[in-house]
Each structure stands twice: as structure tokens, then as C-alpha cells.
């Protein structure tokens, strides 16, 4: 894993997920339910597939050596240029308010910028007030837009 140090309330290291081991499987088992009650468990094979996806970079945050957060940065080329999205940001309940989410997002912003992305988007439920305040502090602006969803597997 490649890492970057961030100055935050606690020492946070952000790494790229490149190898899946028992620690990664345990961390995702612990973190994903905190993101969504409907999130499905990812087995080792699914995590390996995710870590090797060409369009997705999975970032993992550590504090005191323990995995305490994750974020997925998705970059894709479309006719209007390279675009990027932040998806599935989750920080362990016990570690919130310590700068971990900010460290993950700042790393994603840096990587999107280095790659030449024209924009970096994310979505957040209105009920996630702390997360929405964080995104605003980090330079994200709300857009006048609607999100539509179609679930072909339902």
C-alpha cells in the first residue's frame, strides 16, 4: 500500500488498497454496516476484485495502525473529459471527529487533480449533517441537481 501522512487531530495515514488480507476483510466487515444497513458483506474475492478494478482506487485510513476508514475514488473518461466521484466514505463510529474523513477526502482530491479530472463529485444524504458540513469545509459546493436511480437487479 502506498501511503501519505496527514496532520489531523490524530495521526492518520491514508493508503491505497492493493492487497487483501484478513485485516482488510475484518475492517470492511466492521465498516460497511456503519455506511449502510443494507450493505452486503464483501468476501475476500469481492475485495480483491474491488482492489484491482482499473477505474476505482480504494483508500484506507489508519490511526494508531488500525484501519478506521475507507473511501472509493472512481475515475472515468467520458466525452466531456475525465471525471471523478467519491463513493462509500465511511469512518468508524469510534473514530469520528478526529480528521480521518478529511484526510481521506483530501487524498482523493489530490489524486483526482493529479489525474487531470475536470470535476470531483460526491453525494450525501441530507440527514448526514456532520458529513455535509465537512464536505463544505473541504471546498465542495452543493449543486442544483437531482439524482435518479434505477436498480436493474430489483
Image (cartoon, rainbow, N blue to C red):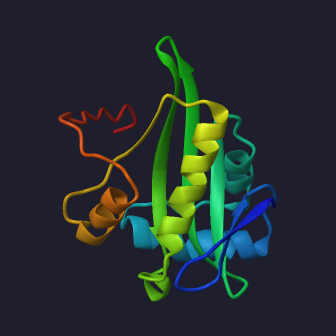
Q: Which residue is situated farthest in the top direction here?
A: 79
Q: Quadrant of the C terminus?
A: top left
Q: Quadrant of the N terminus?
A: bottom right
Give the image location of residue 4, x and y in percent: 72, 64
The picture quadrant where one finds residue 124 is bottom left
Q: Give the residue drawn at x 65%, y 34%.
A: 115
Q: Give the x, y percent position of residue 151.
A: 34, 36
Foreground of the two, 6 or 37: 6
Give coordinates of residue 16: x percent, y percent: 72, 57
User: Front-most of 137 and 122?
Assistant: 137
User: 147 or 140: nearer the eye?
Assistant: 140
Going 47% across and 50% down the picture, which residue do you hit?
87
Which of the 4 quarters of the picture holds residue 35? bottom left
Q: Is residue 17 left or right of residue 138?
A: right
Q: In the drawing, does residue 91 fall left or right of residue 64?
A: left
Q: Is residue 108 above or below residue 34?
A: above
| Residue at image location 60% in from the left, 60% down from the top | 42
Instruction: Classify residue 102 as left or right of residue 3.
Output: left
Q: Position of residue 37 (x, y in %)?
A: 36, 67
The mark total stands at 0
Amino acid at each position: 500500500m502506498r501511503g501519505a501522512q496527514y496532520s489531523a487531530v490524530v495521526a492518520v495515514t491514508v493508503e491505497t488498497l492493493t492487497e487483501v488480507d484478513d485485516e482488510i476483510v475484518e475492517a470492511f466487515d466492521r465498516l460497511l454496516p456503519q455506511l449502510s444497513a443494507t450493505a452486503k458483506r464483501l468476501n475476500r474475492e469481492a475485495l480483491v476484485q474491488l482492489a484491482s478494478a482499473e477505474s476505482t482506487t480504494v483508500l484506507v485510513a489508519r490511526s494508531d495502525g488500525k484501519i478506521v476508514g475507507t473511501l472509493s475514488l472512481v475515475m472515468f473518461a467520458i466525452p466531456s473529459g475525465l471525471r471523478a466521484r467519491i463513493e462509500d466514505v465511511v469512518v468508524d463510529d469510534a473514530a469520528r471527529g478526529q480528521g480521518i474523513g478529511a484526510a481521506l477526502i483530501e487524498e482523493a482530491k489530490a489524486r483526482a487533480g493529479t489525474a487531470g479530472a475536470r470535476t470531483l463529485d460526491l453525494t450525501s444524504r441530507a440527514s448526514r449533517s456532520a458529513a455535509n458540513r465537512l464536505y463544505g469545509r473541504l471546498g465542495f459546493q452543493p449543486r442544483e441537481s437531482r439524482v435518479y436511480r434505477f436498480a436493474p437487479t430489483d
